[in-house]
Amino acid sequence: MLEIKNLHASIEDKQILKGINLEVKAGEVHAIMGPNGSGKSTLASVLAGREDYEVTDGEVLFEGSDLLELAPEERARLGIFLAFQYPVEIPGVSTTNFLKTALNQIRESRGEKALDAVNFLKTMKEKMKLVDIDQSLLSRSLNEGFSGGEKKRNEIFQMAMLEPRLAILDETDSGLDIDALKIVADGVNQLKRPDNAAIVVTHYQRLLDYIVPDFVHVLYNGRIVKSGDKSLALELEEKGYDWIKEEAALEA
Amino acid sequence: MIKEQSIFLEKIQKEFESDSEVQQEALKMLVETGLPNKKSEAYKYTPISKFLEKKADLSLNQPATFNENDRYNTEGSHLVIKNGRFSSEDSIIEEGLKVRSAKISKGKHDPLSLINTVLSKEEIHIQASGNLSPIFIYQINSIGFSNPRIKVASEKNQELTLVEKSINLPGTFINSYIEFDVAANARINFSKVQAYSSDVIAHETVFVKQSRDSRFFVNTFSFSGEVIRNNVTINLEGENCEGHMHGLYLLNGNTHVDNNTSVDHIKPNSYSNEVYKGILDEKSTGVFNGKIYVRPDAQKTNAFQSNNNILLSDDATINTKPQLEIWADDVKCSHGCTTGQMDEDAIFYLRARGIDEKTAKGMILNAFASQAMEKVPVVEVQEELMLLIQKNLY
């Protein structure tokens, strides 16, 4: 589904990603872990198409098409979804109105008919249950005045509405208490299907108690320095990141 | 100080032939003070005297006709004013509303208000009894220099909604004046829609005097014209008043819009809130000057002001200046202004959900602009504003 080959990216001439290789197949959940500043969020942003980053080398193929050539909206229409670490507040635009526009533009790009108001509302009601989000929140301005937990739930709600092929969760667990974490994880788990995949970017192992990954990768200094199964996450939890840094230093 | 020679003033003096004492007095004051000169701070960015000298074409005289399409399709009173004269045959007047042409009475003393006093042909008095449906005022200006003058009186506890739409024919220069006397515990809401042709110059004065416990809302929407200058003055003369000023200027081309506002807290316990928003594209220019005065007696005043601008082009300009003068000590005042480009993070967020760039920008700007409409109580006016916002954004 997704193939990342030798990906290099920089921001303002500072090299952040220094050769990432990763393959994600349908049905898989990959966790990307690593210390602060290792490039985790940069990777998520580059995949979603944020223009602040410059890709200096490498390629990213999504279902065969060259992802790096595409605008953010084109990537979204192919089925890539980024759950933001810091969801943006947009005054005056309601979540409902915004999602309707998004969903219908995605449908249109696939040659499907726009959802009418009744069907849109029906779908919305279904998905609201999934993340336990309240209608009143959705008619308010997008993320404006939302608590940290509400913002993250809103991200997962949007994901449920847009049904992406590949979901990238960027530190979705940061700033969440344990109850909110469970709700968010439940939502993600219920959306799991054999034909979609997820990349879960996280600093802590805690989220992975609820979203069980098939693979765990450790990102350090712009490279994936270690990969394993979920036991690697537990090892990191126990031992911290220092031994990874030491190993990486030895190899270099 | 040596006054600058003014051909415009000389012409007014030469042609003046009113026997009204108020007008004679006003002319005397005007000649004494003169037109705003280069040093006058209030017109720093809008050289109004230059326009008066060069663009007030007194020979221009086009027929003024009211086009039924301009009428808001809703119940209420519809008052048509042609070049400052009330046209009863075009108007619809609800029972309980009195509209009459009166002699000129005194008004504000700044130069442009004085010019209006001197040159007005009649003063249109609007007086309602009880709570009426909205009052729509259509100003049709077709002559070279038009000085419409309106005074609105209110009674205690009354609720009134007024909407003013000017239809200014190409080439006209308007110097309008409207004064509100807001009675105790009355609530008046006044909206202005300014969508003029690209060579119209408009200087529009709104002067409000509020008695105790009253509330006044003014909503000013500017879209197009060559030069628009809005002078909005609210004097909170009684205790426990509320004065609200909302404005939106959504400009492109070479349009220049200058909002000059003043709210004066004279007695204790009053509240004022001012929110102006601007979106400026192409070579348009905007000016915002907001003055807040809090007099020594006006303890427990709450006064808020904000002016937020989005510049969409490198050639667009905004000059914004808040001005607070506070003589009382127990007050809460705040002001803030922001000017910037569109929020790139917000655009990316929407695009990352599949929305194309143009739509994403449109949604953000539309939301920004629409917030200025919150206090407009008439659905038909809101709809018209939505259309004008759409039209000016794309």
Image (spheres, rainbow, N blue to C red):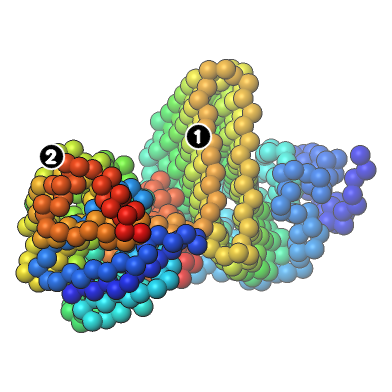
Q: Nearer the viewer, mark 2 or mark 1?
A: 2
Q: Which mark is residue A137?
A: none
- Label 2: element kind: helix
Q: Considering depth in this image, is B66 or A85 the residue closer to the camera?
A: A85
Residue B187 percent coordinates (x, y): 43, 36
Residue B79: % across, % down:
50, 55
**Mark 2 and mark 1 on one chain:** no
Residue B316 lies, in percent from the top left, at 61, 62
Label 1 neighbour load within 10 Å: few <14, some 14-19, many 20+: some
Residue at the disc numbered 2 = A179
The chain letter under disc 1 is B
| Residue B185 sits above or below residue B379 on the image | above
Foreground pick, B206 / A58: A58
**Which chain is mark 2 on?**
A
Pick the residue in front: B294 or B161.
Answer: B294
In-front residue for pair B85/B326: B326
Which residue shows up at 87% across the image and 57% down it?
A: B7
Which residue in the structure is indicated by mark 1? Answer: B304
Tag 1: amino acid: Phe
The amino acid pointed to by label 2 is Asp
Is A194 displayed left or right of B37 in the figure?
left
User: What residue is shown at x 39% (from left), y 48% (from top)?
Assistant: B374
State the residue lying farthest toward the front.
Answer: A250
Asked if residue B156 shows in the view, the reply is no
Q: At 83% from the left edge and 41% from the top edge, which residue is drawn?
A: B33
